[in-house]
Amino acid sequence: MYYLSSSLADRINYDEAVRIYAYESMRAAEVPVWQINPDKLARYCIKLEGLPKSDDPAEARARYIDAFRRTHAEMIRDEIDKAIDELPFDIGDVDEHIQPVRLLWMPNRDSLDALGDAAGHFGDNGGDPDGNLWLAPVSRFSPEELAAAIAAGGKVIDGYAFRYPRVVVINRRMSYIVVPGAVALRGWCGYQIDDVGYALDRNVATAVCAASIALAKEEEEEEEEIDQN
């Protein structure tokens, strides 16, 4: 492993060496890449192999873990692109349906009680949203509602909004990361009544959007076949 000093060349060499090691470690894992926690794997590798000598051990550790995170995100994106390419029909450019948005993230259902009527922004036609998180655009809340949400444990974060025409479920044990109507990723919620979903991560937004549009496309083709017969 490269020595990490204050020189830019050392940093580039270090980051690239860790990236290669992270890639090899994740490829060697006995589970799909979407089931890997990059932070836990990085810490395990540090414990197993140790860090290289450095002028700043804390920075070396932080850069090591960050390299695992970035490598993991790149590998997830590759798996998503591969899954979309292998769908039995064309769903177009998914990225056209994704936009950055400022979100309010509530930690759990209990925290919604403090919001009163504003908790309705986290409901889907009277029910819970799909997915595993409570996310809604900050723009929907008044300053008073936003203050109450933050006091109840909510966080204002940068995230992504995406088209969500059909219900998507989470199945972490799928052999594919994306199929029509299902994904193997967490970190999102979807409101089919509004045709919109929200995610913390761009890759997750892409996956869920693709799964939702793919299911809509699949249903359309099935209806066309029925009409033709």
Image (tube, rainbow, N blue to C red):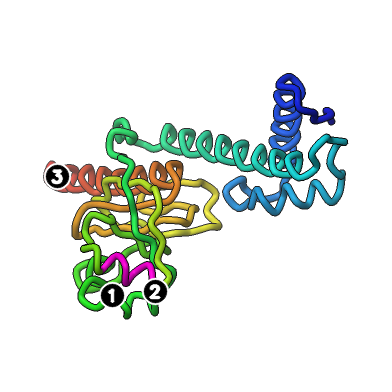
Q: Quadrant of the C terminus?
A: top left
Location of residue 130 (image quadrant): bottom left
Residue drawn at 76 percent across, 39 percent down = 60
Name the residue tied to disc 1: 115
Tell me, yes or no, whether the highlighted magenta stretch contains residue 151.
Answer: yes
Q: Quadrant of the N terminus?
A: top right
**Magenta stretch: helix, strand or loop mostly:** helix
For mark 2, give the secondary structure. loop
**Residue type at mark 1?**
Leu
Tell me where residue 49 appears, x and y as whole percent. Answer: 87, 44
Q: Nearer the viewer, residue 30 or 34?
A: 34
Q: Residues within 10 Å of mark 2 (few under 14, many from 20)?
A: some
Tell me, yes or no, whether the highlighted magenta stretch contains residue 171.
Answer: no
User: In the displayed structure, would residue 121 be above or below residue 99?
Assistant: below
Marks 1 & 2, CB-CB < 8 Å contact: yes
**Residue type at mark 2?**
Ala
Residues at marks 3 and 2, CA–CA distance in whole angstroms: 56 Å
Which portion, as a residue range, is magenta?
145-152
Residues at marks 3 and 1, CA–CA distance in whole angstroms: 52 Å
Q: Earlier in the sequence, mark 3 or mark 2?
A: 2
Marks 3 & 2, CB-CB < 8 Å contact: no
Tell me where residue 222 appears, x and y as whole percent. Answer: 23, 47
Q: In the shown orientation, is residue 228 left or right of residue 174?
A: left
For mark 3, give the secondary structure. loop
Name the residue tied to disc 3: 229
Q: Nearer the viewer, mark 3 or mark 1?
A: 1
Residues at marks 1 and 2, CA–CA distance in whole angstroms: 8 Å
